[in-house]
Amino acid sequence: MTNEQLCVQAKAGDSQAREQLIEKNISFIKKTAYELWNAQPELNTALQIDPDDLVQEGSLGLYGCIESYDPESGNLFLTYAGPAVKNAMLDYIRLQSASFEGKKLNELISLDDAVKGEAESSEHISSEGSVRREPEEIYLAKERIEEIHRALGEIEARNEKYLRYRFGFDDDTEHPLAETAKHFHLTESRAKSTEKAALEDISLELHL
């Protein structure tokens, strides 16, 4: 089956056709990834980027072309999607470069801590059973949590989804890195770099 036929089926909701489209073009994606990585290996090593990261980005770039591709245009699917595959890889390299040069986090923002802080912001009971937390402290704690949620809404959507799942913003359960990587279909090294970039984005929004 041709790329064009697979794309038509994928647009119709056939998930198997989507996977076949990736498999059929994986050699092109890998070739592009290795060419870009080898163009500046020292920089990519410093940024902790490996070719598999670029392959994953390229695959996402190809996925993104499925809906917008018009088989009636006369262009071959790969001719249409090729630039998007390469640009997705280049965008990832630029993102990692910007994160590497940007402000580093002094501490990780843990949802577990945020949730505990939210629960404790209402009151803190001493061993004698008295309320120890002052109203000003309650206000500041709640304000900080609101800042974190606001900052999540300001960063890239993909990074927001990652952090919400990783640190349990939606289910109050912090998920291990390996589980998070599996949830988002990422390698662990890719998950680490995604987490690093997302946390740095949050720190910039919070002015840490």
Image (tube, grey):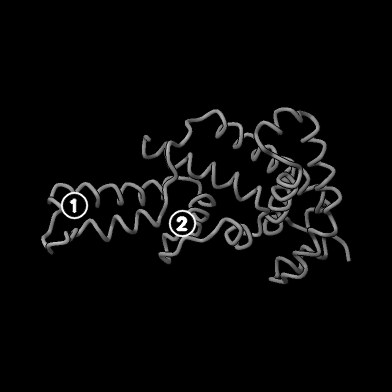
The answer for how far apart the CA atoms under marks 2 and 1 are is 22 Å
x then y, percent, for residue 111: 40, 55
**Residue 28, placed above or below residue 9:** above
User: Can you identify the residue that label 2 sits on?
Assistant: 167
Residue at 76 percent across and 28 percent down: it is 40
Q: Earlier in the sequence, mark 2 or mark 1?
A: 1
User: Can you identify the residue that label 1 sits on?
Assistant: 138
Q: Is 40 placed left or right of 199 in the picture?
A: right
Residue at 42 percent across and 45 percent down: it is 154
> Which quarter of the rendering shows the C terminus?
top left
**Residue 42, placed above or below residue 61:** above
Question: Residue 41's quadrant in the figure?
Answer: top right
x then y, percent, for residue 2: 87, 62
The answer to which of 33 and 46 lies nearer the viewer is: 46
Q: Is 154 placed left or right of 32 in the picture?
A: left
Furthest-right residue in this view: 1
> Which quarter of the rendering shows the N terminus?
bottom right
The answer to which of 42 and 18 lies nearer the viewer is: 42
Residue at 42 percent across and 51 percent down: it is 110
Q: Amino acid at mark 2?
A: Phe
Q: Amino acid at mark 1?
A: Ile
